[in-house]
Amino acid sequence: MTGVLSFILALIITFTSVPIDAHATGIGSQVTTKIGYSVSSQTTSLIGKQESYSIQTGISGTVGSYTLPYSIIYLSKDKFEEPSAADVSTANFIQGVTVDNTSDAQYYKIKVTYRQLTAGPPVTFPFRAVLKNLNVAGGEQVNIKTTFHDKDGVEIVNDNKNFTAAGYVAGIEGNDNSQTNPRQMGYGETIVDADVDSTHTKFSPNYQNDITFSIMNGKKNATNGEVRVVYSEGLDKRPVRVTVTLPSTSVWDASLPNNAGWTYNSADNTITKDFTRTGYEFRPLFTIKYGTGTTVGRQTFPVKTALVNTDGSADSTTERNGSVFKDYSYVRKLKGNKYHLRYNYAVPVKEEYKHAYLITAGQYWGTTVVQNTTTTLNTIIDEPWSPSLFTGYGIRVQNGYFDAANLALITQNKLIGVNDDGSEEVIQTNVPYEVVNNDAAMTTDSIPIAMTPKHYKSVRLEFDNEVTISKYGEKAIGLVVETKLTP
């Protein structure tokens, strides 16, 4: 009898290689657990997207059971976003879900406790997990592990599987319309006298300008080399290699601001730099000289992008090609305006009706205030629209636009009247100026100096030396004149 009992015990030990709960009985029963996608046809996990996986656990055979067993899902903290209990779908067979995010330095642990596991068809529950943006590369294998334990914590069985990560690319944003869609960089650039040659049509060889543009995370367009922006998903961790083709007449200078790290290739006139992303967008920046012979106007820069593998090679499957441009326009740095300060029209003309005007000069080429720039002035001219008698004049200067040395130069002047035959006569030398504090005061209707009415074709305020305006604005200095129409 003892020999028979020993034989039966040997059989039990032999055929229950994966142990079952002490209450389970039967020969040939085995616990299995398996991890996979919830949808069997799925082949990749998109970085940054909440993907659905599943755990299937069961006892083969016809007998055997566990009370309050549990599964643990291990998610690498380097690869996955922090999970929560809500990421596990509820089911009748699940007693509860807890998440341990702190006890293990390497893994987040999701514990799913079953009410009971019995022999028969396996039970399956889905769970969601998100691969971290910018922490995983497209094509990378990411492992998820699961273990099954009895209620006392004894591991019964485990499984793990590698899942293939997928990501998007990076490039210039554009419509998917079968053509390249050049993107404008900013709102264009206004350039002034020092930036151009004597014809005002070509860039000065010394002109420098910063070029920047956006590279976006996105899906490949099907019909061109651009991308459709995706903000929160598919951010591949690999660096982005940006190659810019420069205008043919440009001059690359590695010592200029913002050019560190760019590699110049003289064979194809391109610059290249690898960028590590921190978000869905980044902005390459470099400084360019356009060189001799570059026409002022639109400058276009073809841009190629690709993700960079760990061996330093560009992943050709991620290559994108787009284009950016920047518009340039020349404006005169010194701007002048004529303001009508007093309207006195009557028909017929009354002798006492006089008009007052302000002819201003200032350095101005747009509403954006520019710092640390100067321009020079030597003459202000007024030529009336109709034959007129000049009856008064003066110089008005706005506070803050000139330093002390140039204020002194302003007083060294001549007011000249030009006759109809072209001859000239000096009306006054060293005309004094009055200082005002704002634009409104510049345009007040007051005439500092009266003169005996006299007809001139025009008058000209001429400074003995060039005067430098050192503040940006339209109304730095003005010639005030008073006239009345010739009877």
Image (cartoon, helix red, strand yellow):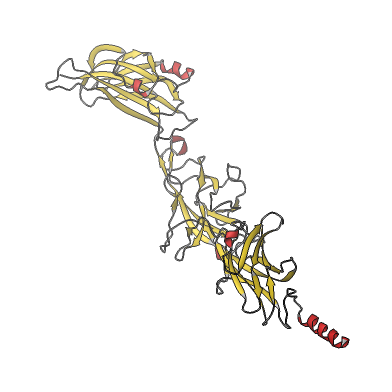
**179 sits left or right of 289 in the view:** left
Give the total of numbered labels.
0
For residue 345, say whether it is visible: yes
Q: Position of residue 30 (x, y in %)?
A: 71, 78
Foreground pick, 208 / 123: 123
Q: In which quarter of the image is residue 425?
A: top left
Q: Position of residue 175 (x, y in %)?
A: 42, 59
Q: Where is residue 351 in the image (x, y as percent from the top left)?
A: 16, 15
Q: Which residue is drawn at 40% across and 32% down?
A: 364
> Residue farthest to the left?
348
Image quadrant for the C terminus? top left
Q: Residue at x 76, y 78 (%)?
A: 17
Image quadrant for the N terminus? bottom right
**294 sits left or right of 479 in the view:** right
Foreground pick, 141 / 283: 141
User: In this rendering, is residue 466 above or below 92?
Assistant: above
Q: In which quarter of the image is residue 70?
A: bottom right
User: In this rendering, is residue 227 above or below 444?
Assistant: below
User: In this rendering, is residue 28 above or below 141?
Assistant: below
> Residue farthest to the front?
1
Q: Quadrant of residue 440?
A: top left
Q: Position of residue 312 (x, y in %)?
A: 65, 60
Q: Residue at x 46, y 46 (%)?
A: 294
For residue 79, say whether it is visible: no
Foreground pick, 118 / 133: 118
Foreground pick, 296 / 292: 296
